Amino acid sequence: MRAGLVPDPRRRPHAEPHQARITDTGDWHAMLGAYAQLQLDLARHVGDLLALGLADLRPGSVPGQFAKLLDDPATEQRGTR
């Protein structure tokens, strides 16, 4: 498995995203599996993470976070001049 920060020698160095061709999805499957496991492992530590100041962006909290953002006077509303 290739590390995510190591450039893939099969790709041109400055290829545009739409020009890059992924021929082997094995790396993606491995990365997604590892990320899913990370989420599962961290789930039991959610209280500790929130106590450290990590934003609570669990699915159930997103509507409330969005509402707070819209209610914040510092939030600029675009398109209303």
Image (cartoon, helix red, strand yellow):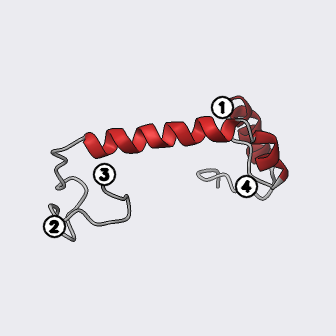
Q: Give the mark, 2 or 1, whose residue is nearer the N terminus.
A: 2
- Secondary structure under tag 1 reads helix
Label 3 Cα neighbours within 10 Å, binned few <14 / some 14-19 / many ≥20: few
Kindly report the distance in space between the C-alpha atoms of the residues bearing marks 1 and 3: 30 Å
Q: Give the mark, 1 or 3, whose residue is nearer the N terminus.
A: 3
Write down the residue under mark 3.
Answer: 1
Residue lying at the far top in this picture: please name it: 60
Badge 1 amino acid: Pro
Label 1 Cα neighbours within 10 Å, binned few <14 / some 14-19 / many ≥20: few
Write down the residue under mark 4.
Answer: 75
Q: Position of residue 79 (x, y in %)?
A: 59, 51
Give the image quarter of residue 15.
Answer: bottom left
Q: Give the mark, 1 or 4, whose residue is nearer the N terminus.
A: 1
- Secondary structure under tag 4 reads loop
Q: Position of residue 76 (x, y in %)?
A: 69, 56
Please give the name of the residue rendered at 59% of the width and 39% of the height, measured from the top-left corner: 39
* Foreground label between 4 and 3: 3
Give the image quarter of residue 75.
Answer: bottom right
Q: Nearer the viewer, residue 21 or 64?
A: 21
Q: Nearer the viewer, residue 46 or 72?
A: 46
- Dots 1 and 3: beta carbons under 8 Å? no
Mark sitting on residue 59: 1
Kindly report the distance in space between the C-alpha atoms of the residues bearing marks 4 and 3: 43 Å
* Foreground label between 1 and 4: 1
Kindly report the distance in space between the C-alpha atoms of the residues bearing marks 2 and 3: 20 Å
Badge 4 amino acid: Thr
Badge 2 amino acid: Arg
Q: Quadrant of the C terminus?
A: bottom right
Left or right? Give the position of 79 relative to 69: left
Label 2 Cα neighbours within 10 Å, binned few <14 / some 14-19 / many ≥20: few
Badge 3 amino acid: Met
Kindly report the distance in space between the C-alpha atoms of the residues bearing marks 2 and 1: 38 Å
